[in-house]
Amino acid sequence: MPDLTSKEIAEVLVAIRIKLLRIVILIFVVWAIFYAFISDLLIEKIRADLLPKGANLIYRAPLEGLILKLKISLIFGILFALPYIVKLVYTTLKERTEILSGFEVSKSRAVVYAFVAFLLFIAGLSYGYMIMLPLFLQFLYESARSQGVLAFYSLSDFINFIVLMLVVFGVIFQMPLFMYILVKNGVADIRTFKYYRRHFYIAFLTIAAIVTPPDIFTQLMVGVPLILFFEISIVIVGILTRFSRS
């Protein structure tokens, strides 16, 4: 893959300077809408659905609730702007450098990719919100209660943790699409993923151990979907690539 020269980097920065303003405006508009109309409803929904019965939320600082709303609104603003950011980076690198010379994505295919990515992201959110997090949070609460302590969670820490985990699962579920795009455009080969299968397993379990408490149950709740989606991705990519060649 060709390397970027200093001249190309300068051209890229000049090209995106004006468009960066559009990204900032988009993020700000979505941020303002979520802050004014949605963030309070979202926080209350998460509290009602995922806070274990018997646990309590507390404020540790006077501005904690306000700062939490600002953070959540900003996260959604960035998520909404992400497709445009990806498009901007792709078109800029494609037009002004040779780094993506062998990487071709038509408009119709880009629309399909975006739609599939959206569906996979929703599937990841659903798995995290309805399956993984309820079991995970209930386990933590029961563990605290068994030690004879009361569960008082900081509102900011509790909501931030849930939002972070949901975003992580949404990204994890992009794996089939990501692998397909790499193989389809010749960036990687399906045999490479198969050959380094064990290495990916170790990486996935390591990630699960980092983002969850040190117990095998919750680690498997994160690690198993990673491994499962990796294997599903290999099968899907293999079928699609064979179909496209026939």
Image (spheres, rainbow, N blue to C red):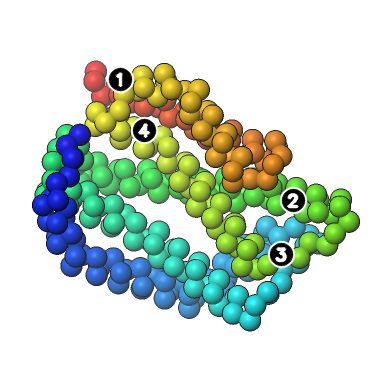
The type of residue carrying mark 1 is Arg
Q: Which mark is residue 179?
A: 4
Few, some or many residues within 10 Å of mark 2 (<14, 14–19, 20+): some
Q: Is residue 112 left or right of residue 172?
A: left
> Which residue shows up at 55% across the image and 40% down it?
207
Q: Can the viewer see residue 128?
A: yes
Residue 225 visible within the image: no
Residue type for callout 2: Leu
What is the crowding at mark 1: few (fewer than 14 residues within 10 Å), some, or many (at least 20)?
few
**Please, what secondary structure does the residue beneath circle 3 have?**
strand
Q: Which disc, if any, is residue 242?
A: 1
Q: Quadrant of the C terminus?
A: top left
| Cα gap from disc 1 to disc 3, whole angstroms | 51 Å
Distance in Å between CA atoms under marks 2 and 1: 46 Å
Write down the quadrant of residue 10 in the picture.
bottom left
Near-viewer residue (203 or 179): 203
Q: Which of label 2 and label 1 is nearer to you?
A: 2
Q: Earlier in the sequence, mark 2 or mark 1?
A: 2
Closest to the camera, between mark 3 and mark 4, is 3
Circles 3 and 4, Cβ within 8 Å, touching? The answer is no
- Residue 224 location, x and y as percent? 59, 33
Give the percent coordinates (x, y) of residue 55.
77, 62
